[in-house]
Amino acid sequence: MMTPEQAVFAAIVTCFAGSAIALLTARSKAMSGWLAFAATAASSILIFGGACEVLLHGPSAEPLKLWAAPAYAISFRLHVDGLAIVFLVLAAGIALPAALYSIRYMEHYADYGVRRYYPCLLLFLAAMYGLLSTTDTMWSFLVFWQLMTLPGYILIRFEYRKEQNRRASRKFLVMMQIACAAIMVGSALLAPSGGGARFEFASVRANLPALLSAHPGTVALAFTLFLIGFGIKMGMWPFGQMWLPDAHPAAPSPVSALLSGVMIKTGVYGVMRYFLWLVPATAQDDFPLARWGVVVTVLGTVTLFTGTMQALKQEESKRLLAFHSIGQIGYILLGLGACMALLPAGPEAGTLAMLGLIGALFHVLNHGLFKGLLFLNAGSMLHATGTQDLNRLGGLMKYMPLTGVTALVGSLAISGVPLFNGFASKWAIFVAAIQGAGSAKYLAVCAAIGILTSGITLASFIKFFGTSFLSRTSELVAEKAGLRPALHGAEPRAHTSRAHTSLANAGSAGTGKLEVGWSMQLPQIVLALCCVLLGLAPGVAFGILQRAIAATPQGAGALLAQAAPVSAGVLSGVTGPLGTAVFVPAGLLAALGVGFLVAYGISRMGSAPRRAAAPWLCGYATEAECDRYIAHNFYSEVKRHFHWVGGAENGKVAVVKGRTS
Amino acid sequence: MQVVWAIFGSALNIALVLSLAPLLHGVMRRITARIQSRQGPPLLQPYFDLLKLLGKEDIESGETPGMQRLAAWLSLAAVLAVACLLPMGFGAPLNLAGDVILLIYLLTLCGVSTLLAGMAAGSTYSLIGVSREMMTMITLEPLLAMALVVGALHAGSLRLDAVLNGSVYMGGSVPWSGLIMVTVMLLSLQAFVQRVPFDVAGAETELMEGPLMEYSGPKLALFQLANMARLVIYCAVFAGLFLPWGSQMPFPLGWLLFWVKVFALVLLVTLVAATHARYRIDQALRYFASLLGVSAVALVLATFGY
């Protein structure tokens, strides 16, 4: 039986080996793709196995020592504890569908080979596994960080013939190097002098109590640098806007899913690891955790509002999703900040702190799932129609129903609609923040802004889903689906109901399908199912996350261990501290189910006949492309009032493109 | 026992909302007509209208009829699910299954159904309506969320029974935050139930019911019934948060009193609707935004216990 560390090491080695093999077989896109998928699957199984081991038997006592050069303070060690497995499982769980999706997706790049794709993808994955389990804050951190950044750079500039992609990848590279430098300088400030493995978490932790009492300013500077460094990585305001919205849309869609679903979470991991688990329990009194909580909460609130409001202005599918990644990171920071602010305030607030941390970790997982799903959806749309421009899409539901349904699931989940996973994690974050207002007053205001922002999220995704999948078939989609373009032209007959019905028949008769192949459908189905199942049974995730937190004993883990556990079950749902908040999905599901039955019964009471007809355009307009209400037109008033939030600098005049006729 | 009570209470709430909502709508129409020196339809006219629609041809003009059907069912189902979460003269039936945060998000779900319906219909007018409806929701729903959070802060709990029990007035000798919130909610109640002067999304005269313009027959009946039920729902939330008096009375009295409160609120909504003209969308949004600013002040006061 392998220890968790050995499993993670084996996963990293598997990825390296797979990378080499994928490079050798890169002549055949399919061959290289399937081999890369096999390597990803093997590494995922190893990671899942290691995670089960930690959850069942607790973390190992000793890290796995790989190689050390004490003279140069270099040590390569891996240690896998509860916090690490949450992120490791996320990485493995998103990489698997993304790798399967890649196989068919990469075939549509006619003039770009996969030589620079699969090898980099696997290196990127290996580096994330390493970064999430290393115990060193300096040199092995540097190696894994660069191993993640450089393949990431190559993947983002995959379509290197487009100038905007090259620019996006350069921004990414520069920002990541700044982040790397900031974190390494921070570590150097905290590490003890002398030789040996002085940059290990253990030695930094041992050095901190003395440093905190002697030089609190140095410690504060170091932690500021950590927050900046990891903040750049995770896309925190104001750093996120500098690279993230350009980098995510530039990369191929499965990579966007990994960048947004997993890579930026390594920044969250870093902030959690350094702020909560680095300072030993004995020195917690000297460490101003509550003040850092204020900083993180406020930054999180600003991040979630600006990111989401900027997303509302986007008219390109993947760019819109990228801005939402910033927004959702804000929610995670809000939960984490609430935890940091409440943890030192006593055992009663500690329970709320626990709930906030569970909410933040759960939102990390959930965001990975639904944002990964949405990027794959956007990829399918791009694959089928060749455009990211929402203004030129419309009516795709009929041509690609499966992508449509899964995109609806993803959109509802990210908007926090109850019974989907996004609601459960936001629920925990908001309960912690509102209830925690007794100890830290600003939390209530931040929670209110968070609730307000989830309305904006919903608006943005109604636009994203509605204009691309619902609305009316656009000229571009009709053309791609092989339907007669005459319907949208100047032909006046097209308005009659007969013409419309013939369009509907043409769609159902087998022509005009745009749906992607099974190997691209399956990842979307799996991710959508995860979103629904975690939404229906959030208690399971709460239970697992509590075990994971309990399996991370260092630092503030001691404080968290004192907190009363959050009661959670499959049927009993989740209950907040002292029963002051409760969410039972089963009860709500029953109520909604009854509601649906009643509604269905009423609607069929008169057994009314159904008939398809063309929309009524007041009798004087034909269904022309220029009459479609496109993404650009949505929410103009709100966009105008919030122009100061920014984010619309790519605002090219999209309407012109829509009016081709 | 608790489960039995939850089922019984939910069934009662659902049945009452379904059966009384059209009557309240009839009352509204009658009073509006009288204010405008007209005769007005009979009180039972909404029931006849709904029954008539149920038998009419169901024209599906969108490209995805499945989505249109789903949206129609969801519109009523979501409202009925909310009805199970609200105290209507007795404790909230599903008090053990959800809290205030769930209530906020479920109320949003009621709006989502209309939005999906409008998007699925695909008419340009519907989409304009969807855009307006969504903009209204962005600025409006936070007002209710603020009110509920203010209540939750005073009650020290997020449970429905604790918050929807006049909790906004619990802070201090003069409940400043509660008084501010009740003013704000009175000024925006009209918009929550989508009546004049804030029916910008439906806007009969310019957008022809907006998101719903393509709907007919049973689907339209469902949307209309859901809209009528929405009136009861929001009045119930308002009564629970701001008019708690008498809700502790024994069963038939407290229960009757609740419906009297709802009736009074409906009367208020009708009077305002009949005597005002519709705002433009930008005017409405500016109005809601200023209310949002005021309610933020109330929230800050509430965190300090006032």
Image: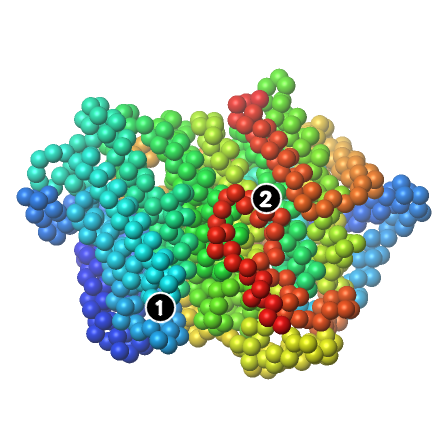
Q: A414 or B226: nearer the eye?
A: A414
Q: Position of residue A405 (x, y in %)?
A: 53, 65
Numbered disc 2: what chain? A
Q: Which residue is mark 1?
A: A161
Query: Residue furthest toward the left?
Result: A71
Q: Are marks 2 and 1 in contact (CB under 8 Å)?
A: no
Q: A492 or A656: nearer the eye?
A: A656
Quadrant assignment, res B65: bottom right
Q: Quadrant of the N terminus of chain A?
A: bottom left
Can residue A142 be seen at all in this image of the molecule? yes
Numbered disc 1: what chain? A
Q: Which residue is mark 2?
A: A641
Q: Amino acid at mark 2?
A: His
* Sequence-first disc among 2 and 1: 1
Q: Quadrant of the C terminus of chain A?
A: bottom right
Q: B272 or A89: nearer the eye?
A: B272
Q: Residue at x 44, y 26 (%)?
A: A439
Q: Residue at x 83, y 42 (%)?
A: B274
Q: Is residue A517 above or below residue A410?
A: below
Query: Residue furthest toward the top?
Result: B173
